[in-house]
Image: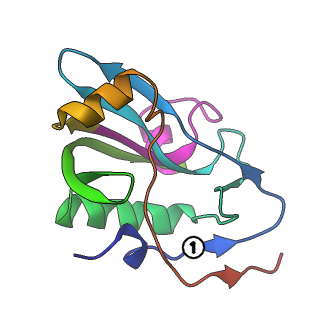
Amino acid sequence: MRKFSDIIKKRAGDNVVKGKFKIAKSDDGKRLVFGWANVSMGADGELIEDWQGDIIEPEELENAAYEYVRLYRDGGEMHERGGVAVLIESVVFTEEKTQAMGIPAGTVPVGWWIGFKVLDDDVWEKVKDGTYSMFSIEGEAERVKVEE
């Protein structure tokens, strides 16, 4: 199985904002959890940098998200154990898509919104108690320095 990082190209750059993306919503009875998998640009158009100092260009993120949905859809636990959740919702918000949906510019970031149904009892308890409060996309890629 390929990792998410096998699909994307990660790029590092200057003048970006660091971001972490928490779980935005969960439904206890249905074991559903939703949030941003990654955000390329904030609603203000500013590039977002991940914890490792990398950015994923919007087009690369969109292509990678489509490949993930097409080929995998499996959710894991802490990059160690798979099969604990299954992807049930995925949308990549781009400037073009939000405009087409009538969402005012500057309202929604450019990024990948996901939802999972958690199948594993222990993992669901950790989501509920806040131990797992955000999504993390696993990846390895060649780091390329970007000149401004």
Count of numbered tags: 1
Of the pair 23 and 79, the residue shown nearer to us: 79
Of the pair 142 and 103, the residue shown nearer to us: 142
Q: Is residue 38 above or below residue 107?
A: below
Of the pair 146 and 24, the residue shown nearer to us: 24
The residue sitting at the top extreme is: 29
User: Mark 1: which amino acid?
Assistant: Lys
Q: Quadrant of the N terminus?
A: bottom left
Q: Position of residue 83 (x, y in %)?
A: 17, 52
Which quadrant holds residue 80?
Answer: bottom left
The residue sitting at the front extreme is: 122
Q: Is residue 145 above or below residue 92?
A: below
| Span shown in magenta | 96-115
Residue at image position (70%, 47%) is 45
Of the pair 103 and 6, the residue shown nearer to us: 6
Residue at image position (25%, 28%) is 32
Q: Is residue 41 left or right of residue 113?
A: right
Query: Is residue 114 covered in magenta?
Result: yes
Q: Position of residue 127 (x, y in %)?
A: 36, 29
Which quadrant holds residue 5?
Answer: bottom left
Crowding at dot 1, Cα within 10 Å, few <14 / some 14-19 / many 20+, comes out as many
Residue at image position (83%, 75%) is 148
Q: Position of residue 137 (x, y in %)?
A: 43, 57
Q: How is the image coloured?
A: rainbow
Residue at image position (64%, 56%) is 50
Q: Secondary structure at mark 1?
A: loop
Q: Is residue 145 left or right of residue 93?
A: right
Q: Position of residue 54 (x, y in %)?
A: 65, 66
User: What residue is disc 1 on?
Assistant: 10
Query: Is residue 65 covered in magenta?
Result: no
Q: Is residue 144 above or below residue 123?
A: below
